[in-house]
Image: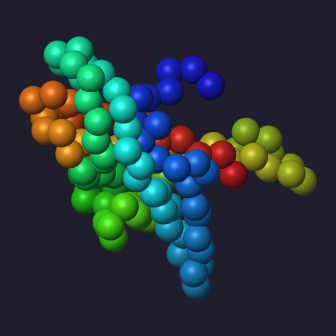
Amino acid sequence: MTNVSMVNEGFEHPAILSVTDGVGTIRLHATTLNARSAKTGAAMKGKVKSLKYFDSGDYIDAERNDDVISFPAESFSFYNLRPGFSPVLHGTLPIKITANVGTMYMPESIAFFSVFL
């Protein structure tokens, strides 16, 4: 995959998709990220502070419980890459991320969260 966002390294892999009573939830576990500030180039160490996902025309705060960030799977736009007996779904969702090092060093950024099912 190309053009993977730096924030990709700020989460454990793989993400978890849980389904309860027909409702899907994506769960991400935030980890410490070592990177250089896009703005200043300084070495930084931090974690994801907040994540907002795009739904119904607006960005909505994801639920957070310690280092676990959750949001509804129904917010994704899915495309079937292989229709038929064994489909492969590709889902994308615009997200906004902020880090706990402050926006002066790592400003809020927008990325596309992608999943393959």
Q: Residue at x 26, y 23 (%)?
A: 43
Query: Would residue 90 appear left or right of 31 to someone viewing this image?
Result: right
Spot the residue most to the top. 41
Residue 35 figure quarter = top left
Query: Would residue 59 appear left or right of 95 to someone viewing this image?
Result: left
Spot the residue most to the right. 85
19 is higher (above) or lower (below) than 55? below
Spot the residue most to the bottom. 21
Residue 5 appears in the picture as rendered: yes
**How many marks on residues?**
0
Residue 51, image x, y percentages? 30, 51
Which one is nearer the viewer's eye here, 10 or 72? 10
Residue 28, image x, y percentages? 47, 57
Query: Would residue 31 appear left or right of 53 to someone viewing this image?
Result: right
19 is higher (above) or lower (below) than 2? below
Q: Residue at x 41, y 49 (%)?
A: 31
65 is higher (above) or lower (below) than 8? below
Residue 33, image x, y percentages? 38, 38
91 is higher (above) or lower (below) than 29? above
Which one is nearer the viewer's eye here, 103 or 88? 103
* Quarter the N terminus occupies: top right
Q: Residue at x 61, y 51 (%)?
A: 14
Q: Residue at x 20, y 45 (%)?
A: 100
Which one is nearer the viewer's eye here, 19 or 75? 19
Which one is nearer the viewer's eye here, 51 or 106? 106
Residue 25, image x, y percentages? 50, 67
Residue 74 appears in the picture as rendered: no
